Amino acid sequence: MAFSQVNFYSKSLRKIVTFNAIVPIDTIEIPGMKEVKKGSMKSLYILSGYSGNYTDWICGSRIQELALKHNIAVFMPSGENSFYLDDTDKGELYGEFVGSELVEFTRKLFQLSEKREDTFIGGLSMGGYGAIRNGLKYYDNFSRIIALSSALIIHNVAGIPEDFKDPIADYKYYTRVFGDLNQLLGSDKDPEALISKLKQEDKPIPDIYMACGKEDFLINENRSYHEFLVSEEVEHTYVEGQGIHDWNFWNEYIEKSILWALE
């Protein structure tokens, strides 16, 4: 299995960026193990949470083992606390980066399938939001979305006053990330609005897998989005399990979600 750290100039971010890549192209055939099919590989672009970076999934999870076990290439970029959204003022377009540029670049660099049905996006917490938002916005690139303990906080921060502050951040940060907070709902940063837009335009909606711990501080936000998807009759998988906002929960559900994506 090839594990690589890649540095390249991103046009979307206007700087040299780093991402980790796991590409099981050099698997060893062991007697008793299931034979691995050769050829173009399916791929998963998996995003880290708030304050994390491209090392999180390698350090905190079994993602290397799972990539080898299930014969899938995995790519891990950094989000720099951007919620994987485009900051046009700074010229750092993280949505475009993970939703389009990184997919195009890795397909050139590695032996990947270029089919939409073989390309997935996922993440945890902030990265779970980023996976849903960019999986829907760039629906023509991704067929499946994996969202674990997603920070679906749009309704929490929309219209907040200038003196707002929560345990994570304050008004200035949320304005920097999401823009005009009075215009947030209904924008292309609103996962509910993106679903409505795809339905109105009769575009394919990626399949969605959501999982959240019952004791997670984001459980109500995840339940709310699940209820929205039900009300819109959008097929999806929603799972709640015992657990909090930690790697114990994510390690359990990342394999379950990968198996779901590969079905």
Image (cartoon, rainbow, N blue to C red):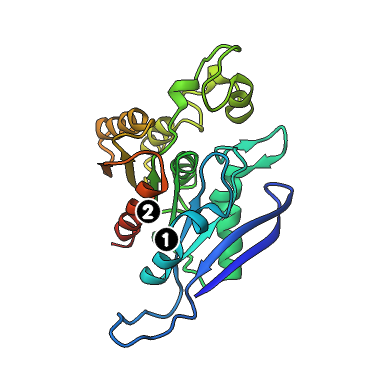
Q: Can you tell which mark lies on residue 94?
A: none
Which residue position is annotated with label 1? 62
Question: What residue type is disc 2 on?
Answer: Asn
Residue 45, image x and y in percent? Answer: 49, 55
- Kindly state the secondary structure of the residue where label 2 is placed: helix
Q: Is residue 214 above or below residue 119?
A: above
Q: Is residue 45 left or right of residue 106?
A: left
Distance, label 2 to label 1, CA atoms, is 7 Å
Where residue 217 sits, quadrant-wise, is top left
- Give 195 or 200, whichever is nearer the viewer: 195
At 46% from the left and 51% from the top, the residue drawn is: 140
Relative depth, front residue between 147 and 190: 147
Q: Is residue 30 above or below residue 187?
A: below
Q: Is residue 206 visible?
A: no
Relative to residue 184, is residue 41 depicted above or below?
below
Q: In the image, which disc is placed on residue 251?
A: 2
What amino acid type is highlighted by mark number 1?
Arg
Q: As rendered, which of 235 and 57 lies closer to the eye?
A: 57
Q: Position of residue 249 (x, y in %)?
A: 35, 47
In the picture, the quarter occupied by the C terminus is bottom left
The image position of residue 77, as x and y in percent, is 58, 53
Q: Are marks 2 and 1 in contact (CB under 8 Å)?
A: yes
Q: Residue at x 60, y 12 (%)?
A: 162
> Element at badge 1?
loop
* Mark 1 Cα shell of 10 Å, populated few (<14), some (14-19), many (≥20): some
From this viewpoint, which residue is outermost toward the bottom?
Answer: 31
Q: Quadrant of residue 2?
A: bottom right
